[in-house]
């Protein structure tokens, strides 16, 4: 079943949003499986870089590792953007750069939110997750054909249709700043944030970006347990930062500093951040 287009989202038409963001194309959908899939279909039909897809609701919203991204109607922003980088030396950097851009833009737009990036792709406010990034690249003959970067942000409190365990672990912008939030302003922050860090190069984080990451790194100095993809058991230690290519820097309780590229990282206790310095 093909997804239905809608004429307005958050009270704005496609033409208004195109102009607001200076985009070649904005596609608004009502109920959509996943905006990433919809954007990929458009990219395969030669939609230009910068094209944006927004869903009012997703029935198959997904996150990293195939997890479900609960996407009830008019609660969050579910937005995907098409990028066409000439090269992609460090694919692992994509979610980190995208996340850094979005966190920075949210911080500038919503006073009192204090957002942070939990490596590699989660957006936190305080001790709970309020958003995530899913970057998916397609390749052709060793070169990137397109990258779809999807961002989901809980703008409003999650309704009871979302499982209680998810609601308890998550938060929303409105919960955090105790004020009404306009979905279009959240989308502004996403678009500006993605453009700021993915517009040019995606090969390495420069000094400015590394300084910002240091500031927004939710895991830094926390005790964590790291389960590397393919490993049998988790290792405990301290997350110490993020490398220029997007890898997590992890100091295990025994042994030397390690670079972690593909792993599930769980904080040992919510309040276990050590004083730094
Ligand atoms: C994660 O937490 O692992 C990432 C969540 C990403 C969710 C967004 S919502 C828009 C886009 N469409 C999807 O199906 N996923 C991303």
Image (cartoon, rainbow, N blue to C red):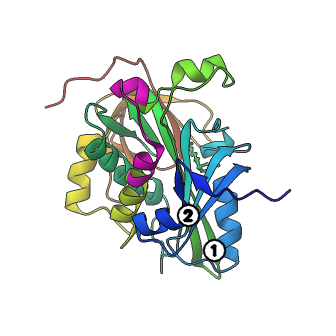
| Residue 247 visible in the snapshot | no
In-front residue for pair 110/265:
110
Residue 46 in the image: state x and y as whole percent. 65, 80
Q: Quadrant of the N terminus?
A: bottom right
- The mark that comes first in sequence, 1 or 2, is 2
Instruction: Identify residue for label 1.
Output: 139
Instruction: Determine the main secondary structure of the stretch shown in magenta.
Output: helix
Q: Residues within 10 Å of mark 2 (few under 14, many from 20)?
A: some
For the C terminus, the image quarter is top left
Residue sticking out furthest to the left: 277
**Residue 11 sits above or below residue 19 on the image:** above
Residue name at image x 56 percent, y 58 percent: 80
Is 117 placed left or right of 129 in the picture?
A: left
- In the rendered view, tell whether residue 224 sits above or below residue 134: above
Residue on which the image places disc 2? 14
x, y percent for residue 236:
43, 27
Which residue: 57% across, 21% down? 167
**Residue 147 appears in the rendering:** yes
> Is 57 a magenta residue?
no
The segment highlighted magenta reads 174-188
Left or right of 3 in this view: 26: left
- Residue 191: image quadrant is bottom left
Reply above or below: 60 against 204: above
* Outermost residue, right side: 1
Q: CA distance from mark 1 to mark 2?
A: 30 Å
In the rendered structure, does residue 176 fall within the stretch colored magenta? yes
């Amino acid at each position: 079943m093909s997804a239905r287009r809608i004429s307005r989202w958050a009270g704005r038409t496609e033409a208004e949003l195109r102009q607001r963001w200076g985009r070649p194309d904005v596609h608004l959908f009502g109920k959509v499986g996943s905006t990433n899939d919809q954007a990929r279909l458009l990219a395969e039909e030669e939609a230009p870089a910068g094209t944006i897809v927004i869903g009012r609701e997703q029935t198959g919203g997904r996150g990293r590792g195939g997890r479900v991204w609960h996407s009830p109607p008019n609660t969050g922003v579910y937005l995907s953007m098409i990028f066409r980088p000439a090269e992609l030396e460090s694919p692992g950097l994509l979610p980190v750069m995208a996340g850094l851009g979005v966190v920075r833009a949210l911080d500038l737009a919503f006073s009192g939110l204090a957002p942070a990036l939990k490596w590699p792709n989660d957006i936190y406010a305080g001790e709970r997750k309020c958003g995530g990034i899913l970057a998916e690249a397609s390749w052709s003959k060793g070169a990137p054909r397109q990258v779809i970067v999807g961002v989901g942000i809980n703008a409003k409190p999650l309704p009871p249709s979302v499982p209680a365990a998810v609601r308890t672990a998550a938060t929303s912008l409105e919960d955090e700043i105790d004020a009404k939030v306009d979905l279009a302003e959240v989308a502004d922050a996403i678009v500006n944030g993605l453009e700021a860090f993915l517009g040019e190069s995606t090969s390495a984080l420069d000094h400015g970006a590394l300084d910002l990451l240091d500031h927004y790194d939710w895991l830094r100095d926390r005790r964590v347990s790291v389960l590397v993809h393919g490993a049998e058991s988790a290792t405990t230690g301290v997350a110490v930062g993020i490398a220029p290519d997007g890898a997590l820097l992890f100091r295990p309780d025994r042994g030397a500093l390690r670079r972690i590229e593909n792993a599930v990282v769980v904080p040992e206790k919510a309040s276990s951040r050590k004083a730094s310095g």
